[in-house]
């Protein structure tokens, strides 16, 4: 971009042309993969199973059904979406982990949930996220601290002055809502009680709306729906970046500028976990030649401005992170911790 910005003036353009700039540009574009170049006969006429570890109608299902026809168009294959709900995506992921090496299966993973299931050693988790063949991250969310719509608390300063414990609604301790609430309470030194057993965020949001629960911790898309429906109000975005859906809502760092280094570490680590978002992956056994084709197709789809715009209209945002960076993010979450840090995270999530 700096090269092109530097030749905006006519005189610079003339000099650039004289130095062979047009030829350089021609070469540059000649090496940009087009849709037709990205297509490969290896998948033509075949059927690809796009596994979703959650029920039909949810966010992961919606992203899969947005992506499936685009893969189909690019690869010349038939792409079939299969819902295999169970245990927060764990059931499908365990099966996916041992899928045959034919390159005909992909899935969209809840990277936040899967990484914590693995890190915490959740019973029944038989996969290693670092061994999957990564295609990229389609989307990720910053998460929000919500309270009851009639709550007297409007800011984190208000919350920190509260004398009574905050009751947080969640489906389970390792559920996104539950582990996020536990880490938030620990990081901010809050008095909290986690109440589990709600069947998803909608049920927890209803409890918050009725005042049965004081708070909940959810992704920005869910938070937007609950706030818009007047079932909750947002107190803070638990990230260094503001939410695109709550641009006027200050982050925890803006509201609490004097956080200790340890408090900052907890919030930043949690934000990194959340950045894993909706990861597109293939089984560990996928052949390298087919992985290369699928990575190129994924890049073509998620880099397409029209596809991004279509998703935004449906509130299904695309925040594409390529395969290499996604692999680094996964490694940061799962391999960068000391044994002491891992033990402390387990204690906070499972016992706080």
Image: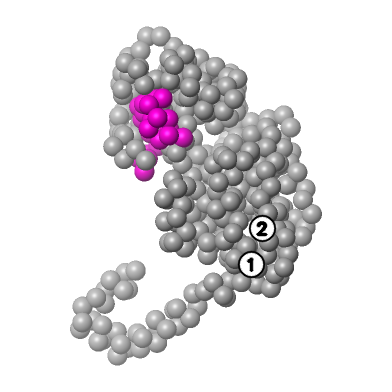
At a point 60% along the width and 56% down the height, the residue shown is: 68
Q: Disc 1 vs disc 2: Cβ atoms closer than 8 Å?
A: yes
Is residue 287 visible in the rendered image? The answer is yes
Position of the N terminus, as image quadrant, is: bottom left
At a point 61% along the width and 71% down the height, the residue shown is: 39
Quadrant in the rendering for residue 35: bottom right
**Residue 226 colored magenta?**
yes
Check disc 2 and report its element: helix, strand or loop.
strand
Quadrant in the rendering for residue 78: bottom right
Residue 11 sits above or below residue 189 on the image:
below
- Magenta residues (range): 222-244
Horizontal placement of 240 versus 53: left or right? Answer: left
Check disc 1 and report its element: helix, strand or loop.
helix
In this view, the residue in front, 221 or 28, is 221
Disc 1 to disc 2, how far (Cα)? 9 Å
Residue 269 sits above or below residue 166 on the image:
below
At a point 57% along the width and 61% down the height, the residue shown is: 70
**Residue 173 colored magenta?**
no
Residue 134 in picture, x, y percent from top left: 62, 54
Residue bearing mark 2: 79
Mark 2 surroundings: few (<14), some (14-19) or many (≥20) residues within 10 A: many
Residue 291 in picture, x, y percent from top left: 66, 62
At a point 53% along the width and 24% down the height, the residue shown is: 203
In this view, the residue in front, 336 or 271, is 271
In this view, the residue in front, 49 or 155, is 49
- The circle drawn on residue 75 is 1
Residue 20 in picture, x, y percent from top left: 35, 88
Is residue 268 visible in the rendered image? The answer is no
């Amino acid at each position: 971009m700096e090269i092109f910005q530097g030749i905006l003036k006519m005189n610079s353009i003339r000099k650039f042309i004289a130095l062979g700039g047009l030829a350089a540009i021609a070469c540059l574009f000649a090496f940009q993969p087009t849709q037709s170049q990205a297509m490969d006969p290896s998948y033509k006429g075949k059927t690809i199973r796009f596994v979703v570890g959650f029920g039909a109608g949810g966010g992961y299902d919606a992203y899969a059904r947005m992506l499936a026809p685009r893969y189909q168009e690019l690869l010349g294959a038939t792409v079939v979406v299969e819902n295999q709900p169970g245990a927060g995506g764990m059931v499908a992921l365990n099966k996916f982990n041992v899928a045959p090496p034919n390159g005909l299966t992909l899935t969209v993973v809840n990277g936040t949930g899967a990484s914590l299931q693995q890190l915490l050693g959740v019973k029944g988790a038989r996969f290693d996220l670092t061994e999957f063949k990564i295609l990229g991250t389609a989307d990720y969310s910053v998460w929000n601290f919500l309270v009851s719509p009639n709550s007297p608390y409007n800011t984190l300063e208000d919350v920190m002055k509260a004398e009574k414990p905050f009751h947080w609604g969640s489906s389970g301790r390792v559920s996104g809502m539950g582990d996020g609430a536990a880490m938030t309470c620990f990081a901010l030194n809050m008095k909290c009680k986690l109440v589990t057993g709600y069947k998803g965020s909608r049920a927890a949001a209803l409890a918050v709306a009725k005042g049965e629960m004081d708070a909940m911790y959810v992704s920005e898309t869910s938070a937007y729906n609950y706030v818009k429906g007047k079932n909750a109000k947002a107190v803070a975005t638990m990230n260094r970046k503001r939410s695109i859906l709550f641009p006027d809502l200050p982050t925890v760092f803006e509201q609490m500028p004097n956080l200790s280094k340890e408090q900052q570490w907890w919030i930043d680590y949690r934000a990194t976990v959340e950045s894993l978002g909706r990861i597109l992956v293939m089984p560990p056994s996928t052949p390298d030649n087919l992985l290369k084709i699928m990575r190129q197709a994924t890049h073509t789809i998620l880099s397409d401005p029209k596809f991004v715009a279509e998703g935004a209209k449906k509130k299904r945002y695309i925040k594409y992170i390529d395969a290499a960076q996604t692999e680094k993010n996964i490694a940061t979450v799962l391999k960068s911790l000391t044994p002491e840090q891992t033990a402390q995270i387990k204690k906070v999530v499972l016992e706080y």
